[in-house]
Amino acid sequence: MPTNDQHRGPDWHDNDGEELFVAQDPDHLVASEAGSAPLHTFDRASQTAKRVLFGRTISSADEGEQRLSKRLALPIFSSDAISSSAYASEEILLALIGAGTGVLMYGPLVALAIGLLLGLIAVSYRQVCYGFPNGGGAYAVASSTLGTIPALIAASSLIVDYIMTAAVSVAAGVAAITSALPELGQWRLEIALGALALLVVANMRGIRESGRIFAAPTYVFVIGAFLVIGIGLVRIVLGDPAINWSAHVQLELTAASQVILPLLLLRAFAHGSVALTGTEAISNGVASFKKPESKNAATTLMAMSALLGTLFVGISLVAYAYGKVPIEGGETLLSQVARASLGDGPLYAAFQVATMGILLLAANTGFNGGPQLARILAADAFLPRQVGQRSGRLAFGSGILLLAICASILLIATGAIVTDLVPAYAIGVFIGFTISQAGMVVHWRRLRNDGWRGRAILNGIGAVVTFVVLIVITAAKFSDGGYLVFIAIPLLTAFMLMVKHQYALHTAELAVPAEKIFEGLHRNRRIFAPFGEINRSTVRAVNVGRLLASGGGEIIALRVVFDEEEEHQIRERFEHHFPDVRLVTILSPYRAIIEPLIHYLDEIEEELDDHGQRLMTVVMVPEYSGRHWWDRVLHNGNGKRLRDALIGRANTVVLDIPYRRHLPD
């Protein structure tokens, strides 16, 4: 009669009493944190290091708690756009100053024009937040409305833009510090790479954690920038004599300047359009917001647009009022303006630190938006699926690391100089803008709900305007390095198509017919047990082979020998230990091991069973699984080589038979 102990189910606890599974149903278990802990010493040490750097592992059930409120989402997703006010005004003036200081008066007007375009794009992307609540931005829109190729072009352009965002923002943040502390200029690249590494660590801690870390610099910068602008405007209104409108800026235009003025303005518009980068990041990350996701994302997007437009135009106006001009390779324009408004005291120093903070946080927009987009592409099989997998902190670790590597390459190639990075910046994002707006026109025409015509017209205007701007900035930046974007985008698109093609092939090969019912195995099989030494590992492999053969089949032990004496010794000992198992030895005078085994399997596989069917080949690979990594290094690796040679071989099943001393024979 069975005892009570025999009726008891598993204990589901480890040796320390920690619960391994949370289970109400024996056939459906939920692993606990202890049940998900690493098994080996090295893996446990690795997890401890990750916990110190990134924090404890977060359960998937807690994902909702990691979603962002509008207060945290603003610095995370909008910092790229808001921070561009720190250098976009300077880019406008750098494009104008070549024709003399007289044309600098148009700087605020160009900034205003870009601000109006920002408003149009923001309103258009607000509709994307509602139309595509799962995120994906331009890629999701184009994929649903325009087809695969436009969607992948949009995705590729955004990937390029996110990489550029990380590189440009870090370089600009370092420029802010070296403006205040010029003696650090010689360490520009080292500081930039160090800052990038810190951003990787912060983002690997999870999106909510990184938001908490970087929220303060964004809000301090916004407050400081409004203070700088406000002081400047008050001094203008009061007619402060310290602001001499003609001391540094000559208002009269030369005849030559008047002739080339339209081209100069277009060039300035193109360079200043870097202010619009990052506008789409919120629409890519709608799924990261707290519920209601679309509404919160749309509200955050409009708040970001209002802040950026005000800061960008305001800084451009005050810079002109102060008569400040860019110093290429020297103090930034924003630093000059802040010094003029705040003086050289603590307020200026605090503002420069905040400027560096938000510029580095702007790189964080790339680290948040890029992996989010990569997750969607991986789900659609256009990128390797590993890119879409979450880390222990629910971050998309692979995407974060790939983006950091690409940004590092750009920083090293340009020496972390902002002006060397900017020419290839913004082109990609306007490609995405144009495709997204065109796709939204198709979306509204298909939907035809209340007010669809007005929305379609708005997006249509956005598509035309952003396409015109794309042509302008491409013409202005192409020869300065913008052409690189038009090399990178086709390469990325081709790569994603290749990945999709490979996944389609794999799916077709692995597909299971819906009507097929799989019952027990009826095919005869031949089980091979190759071995080196006759030891406990070999015993385990032979015993497993006996079990498999008992269901219909034959077990054959295989041994490669190098001379007749070795063959005699091996056969005598093997037949003593395993009298019921057939042993086939292969003499190898050229001392090859794997190749003779494969050729033998190829030849014997031609034999058919009594029913005229080819027998299934099962090859068991015994190996010693030591307790430590160095135990495995000490063995010659023939098992791995044999496994690699057999993987993918037709009509062949490969079984690993590991042995460790505490396992029973």
Image (cartoon, rainbow, N blue to C red):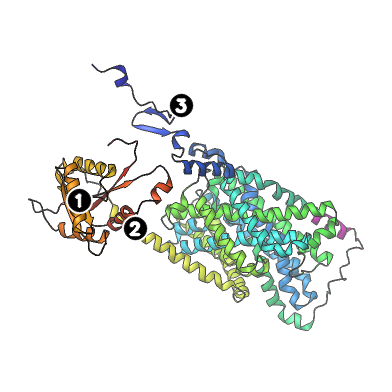
Instruction: Give the amino acid type for the residue marked by disc 2 in the picture.
Output: Ala
> The N terminus is located in which quarter?
top left
Write down the residue under mark 2.
504
| Mark 1 or 3, nearer chain start | 3
Q: Horizontal placement of 498 versus 453: left or right?
A: left
Does dot 3 land on a helix, a strand or a loop?
A: loop
State the residue lying farthest toward the left: 610
Write down the residue under mark 3.
17
Q: Position of residue 342 (x, y in %)?
A: 84, 55
Does dot 1 land on a helix, a strand or a loop?
A: helix
Rendered image quadrant of residue 505: bottom left
Q: Position of residue 290 (x, y in %)?
A: 57, 41
Instruction: Give the amino acid type for the residue marked by disc 1 in the picture.
Output: Gln
Q: Residues within 10 Å of mark 2 (few under 14, many from 20)?
A: few
User: Does the segment drawn in magenta span residue 466?
Assistant: no
Q: Spatial distance from mark 1 to mark 3, Cα to Cα?
A: 51 Å
| Mark 2 or 3, nearer chain start | 3
Write down the residue under mark 1.
569
Q: Residues within 10 Å of mark 1 (few under 14, many from 20)?
A: few
Residue range (magenta): 228-241
Q: Residues within 10 Å of mark 3 (few under 14, many from 20)?
A: few
Magenta portion: prevailing SS class: helix
Depth check: 342 or 349 in front? 349
